[in-house]
Amino acid sequence: MPIITISRGSFSGGQVLAERVAERIGYRCLSREVLVEAAATYGVPEPALTQFLDTSPGFWERLTQSRRLYLIFLQAVMCERARQGYLVYHGQAGHLLLPGISHVLKVRLIAPLAHRIQAVMAREGLGREASLAWIQRADAERLRRMQYLFRADWRDPALYDVVVNLEHMSLETAADVVLYMAQHPEYQPTPASTKALQDLTLSRRVQAAVAAHPTTRGIEVEAQADNGVVWVRGSIDEAELLEEILDLVRTVPGVKEVIPELDIRPIFPYPGV
């Protein structure tokens, strides 16, 4: 059976759908909160990760490395959980954290605006107009965040295998649809897709290890893995950092061999020196 990711707007019923699907097939149900909690093991406080995911990027944030670092940590955790299999994930952009893995069934859930307004009114105690404004504001914030984080419009149906509309469908029927698709051969793990997930996991482990280590935290490296062989690419300022990075990568579980492709940036003297 595939890994199932469910993306949805606020108050669209995504958590309930994920829980029902997971219960019916005996899968673990993973939320964004669990992902954030696990990602905090890399040394980023949970409040910082939560704010990163919940707040639209400001001008100064666009000029920092926070986007890249936090995404590396989140993706490393998502890959680790996905490797264990038997997973239904609901939350922001789960499918975008697992690129190139064919046994991920990507579901988008949408619900009528009237249904969402009623849900906000019941939970937040707001009037109809205030609830509509709340939804519009939340959707706009989510759109900006996803574009900033992944350079993607999360509303694009082409990002999903199926879009489920609750306008004339109950959540039980929606669960039936998801489970029906999940049984089909297109979404089953294959040796190639399992290897792709293993390689992706190892590459993100390596990047997360470099990003989290105090000595190498500000260094941007890319990693590509193939059956335990890891290519490490990027640019560094000091030759002494090369061995530190390679020694660190060799300690990452699953790494059998490291092939360095790191350039050392030249140091240009100031004019007149």
Image: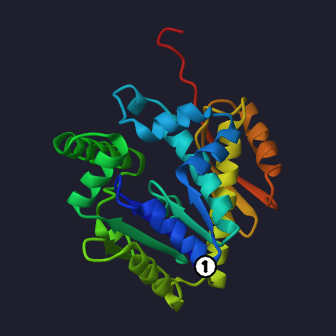
**How is the model colour-coded?**
rainbow
Q: Quadrant of the C terminus?
A: top right
* For residue 187, above or below residue 86: below
| Residue density around tag 1, few if under 14, some if 14–19, many if 20 or more, within 10 Å | few
> Which residue does the image show at 61% across and 46% down from the upper left?
73
- Horizontal and vertical percent position of residue 199: 66, 66
- Horizontal and vertical percent position of residue 140: 26, 45
Q: Is residue 64 left or right of residue 163?
A: right
Q: Is residue 265 at least partly visible in the picture?
A: no
Quadrant of the image occupied by residue 88:
bottom right
Q: Nearer the viewer, residue 78 or 210?
A: 78
- Horizontal and vertical percent position of residue 195: 67, 75
Q: Residue furthest bottom?
A: 185
Q: Nearer the viewer, residue 268 or 79?
A: 79
Q: Is residue 192 left or right of residue 124?
A: right
Q: Quadrant of the N terminus?
A: bottom right
> Which residue does the image show at 19% across and 45% down from the upper left?
128
* For residue 252, above or below residue 215: below
- Horizontal and vertical percent position of residue 179: 50, 82
* Circle 1 residue: 25
Q: Nearer the viewer, residue 100 or 110?
A: 110
> Which residue does the image show at 76% across and 65% down from the upper left?
228
Q: Is residue 94 left or right of residue 120?
A: right
Which amino acid, by three-letter code, is at mark 1?
Ile
How many numbered dots are placed on residues in this image? 1
Q: Residue furthest top?
A: 272
Q: Secondary structure at mark 1?
A: helix
Quadrant of the image occupied by residue 118:
bottom left
